[in-house]
Amino acid sequence: MKIIILIIALITMNAFAAEETAGKTKVYKYKEYEVIDLGSMEIKGQIIAPGDLTVNERERKVFKRSLLEKNNFDFENKREIENLR
Amino acid sequence: MKYLLMTCLMAMLAGMSPDAHASAKAAFEIYKKDKTHLKNKKIAHELIDGQFYFSAIPYINQYLEENNDIDAELEADIETLVVKTGTMAVLNLDEKRLESFNIPSISLILGKRLFDKEQYEKAYTVLSKIPDTHKFGIEANLIKGTIKNLQRKNVEAMNFYEQCAKKAEQQESSFSKEINKRYYTYLKETCIIRTARVKIEEHKYEEALDTYEQIDKRSYKWPYILMDKAWAHYYLKDYNRSLGLTVTYKAPLLESYFFPEAEVLMALSYYNLCLWDDALKVVDHFYEFYQPKADALKDILGQNKKSDTYFLDLYYADPKTRENLNPFIRNLITQTRKQVKFNLDLASLKAAKEELALLKRLKNKNDFTAQLEGNLDSTISFISAKINYYIKKEIFTFINEIHKHSYSMFNLKLELLSKKRDELYNAKSNAQSDRNRGSEQNVTRKKNQMFFDFNGSFWADELGDYSFGLNSQCKDQESK
């Protein structure tokens, strides 16, 4: 119990020392009132419609399914050899 | 002397020819007296001399299992066995053992076995040992050409096919016996068709079509080339001719030939003519026609997959019984019967049974005849199981074909529905209704091709020359 009290006392003393080294006590003050006039704000720039540079015109992609192609006769040729003898 | 008299008596009772009698006697004497390592070889030789080919198989196999030497006499005997019994001549020897022999007949059997196992490089090396001048050189060239064809080495493939066709033609004319002639005609035509197929693969469609003209309409191979020709016309964009060729399979004469691929090609041809409704009709017909048949066949396969005789028994069953089971089976078996391998195996089965009957008729039995009978019984069971397996495999391949093409048809149907949807969006749905259904003007034909109207009946001499006269709707679709 004694050890715990001692440790707490040491930490507290250290904290006070830090404030003391700064020399002054800091006082934080917040703005109490501020007006923002949105009407007087100005954005510099140019308003343009979307054109060739911004939109790429392209045809709609048409997905083609793979239909049967006869590139070779491997199936028939192999079967013929299997049926040879 | 006692044995000699007994064998003579046996032979006479069995109604053997004098040669067969002498050979059987000699085989029996060798069986009893010979104690050398050549015993099995000598017995086999005598049995082959007496035309007991199937009885000789176990003795030849036994000899080759134990010995590496093959003299001229044995080489001739093995060749005779290959001709008379097919690949069963060295039935019991595995590939590793067969590799130690260097004679054409064994090289052919080994090469074919390796080809069937898709060991193409090894098969090619083994088949290359067969001299071109040898009678088995024709088959060797056909298989070697196929291997090069599969490897896309078309120049080499073409070379082998041409050699094969040329040599087969020479052999064909050298035989007087019809059965031998027919086999070499078959080989010659197979090799000619292969050259045409290579041309199609190389996009030389016109050349390919000219090559197909060499196949006579009466040929056994002819119904099969209709599909090849239809593809050639399809790639030439002559869709009407392609339709005409595929519709030929609907002729009563070709009733037993059914190619699911023909239906796909027909639908594709309509599709390329922009006749969506016609194409859709073919697609729907495909599912209606083939799906129940595939299911029925799958059931039969499933129920009898363990049987070694069921499918062979179906072959022997009368057509009425087969039709009661499934009408489709009749046509499938008819088509299977037209395969060379099936016929050779069936002939082997018959010959082996006759040999066994001859042995069983003998009154004086001994341990030699008992051994021959036992061996023959096993050989017959093996051939039966082999044929049964063959039919089963054919059915299985057919079901697979249907499934494969169902996928193609599914894709095509999606494409067709998409086209029809586009038409609806573009208010062109009535475009097809007022089309001209057919005209001579739409038929592309060569100078030597005549034009006759189709009046609803198929004539045998017209088969394979049909063409539709449909007008392509594609131009209309583009312009509207």
Image: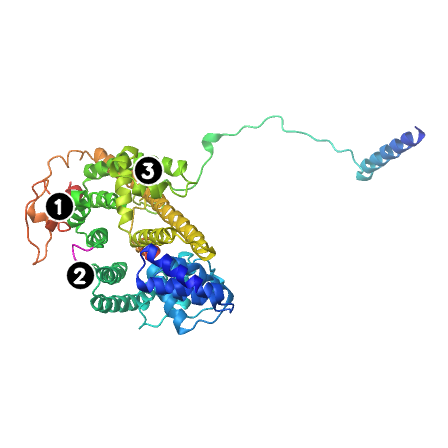
Residue B271: which numbered mark, if any? none
Confirm or deny contact between disc 2 and disc 1 (CB under 8 A). no
Q: CA distance from mark 2 to mark 1?
A: 24 Å
Q: CA distance from mark 2 to mark 3?
A: 35 Å
Tag 3 secondary structure: helix
Give left or right: position of B416 versus A16: left
Q: Residue at x 40, y 47 (%)?
A: B385
- Nearest the camera: A23 or B26? B26
The quadrant in which residue B52 appears is bottom left
Q: Which residue is mark 3?
A: B294
Q: CA distance from mark 3 to mark 1?
A: 30 Å
- Nearest the camera: B238 or B196? B196
Residue farthest along the right direction in this orientation? A2
Q: Which residue is mark 1?
A: B468
Confirm or deny contact between disc 3 and disc 1 (CB under 8 A). no
How far across and down, in percent of the image, does residue B322 sit?
A: 28, 37
The quadrant in which residue B150 appears is bottom left
Do the residues indicated by labels 2 and 3 lie within the same chain of the protein?
yes
In front: label 3 or label 1:
3
Tag 1 secondary structure: loop
Which span of residues is magenta-colored? B213-219
Residue B218 colored magenta? yes
Do the residues indicated by labels 2 and 1 lie within the same chain of the protein?
yes
- Nearest the camera: B23 or B186? B23
How far across and down, in percent of the image, does residue A19 sit?
A: 81, 36
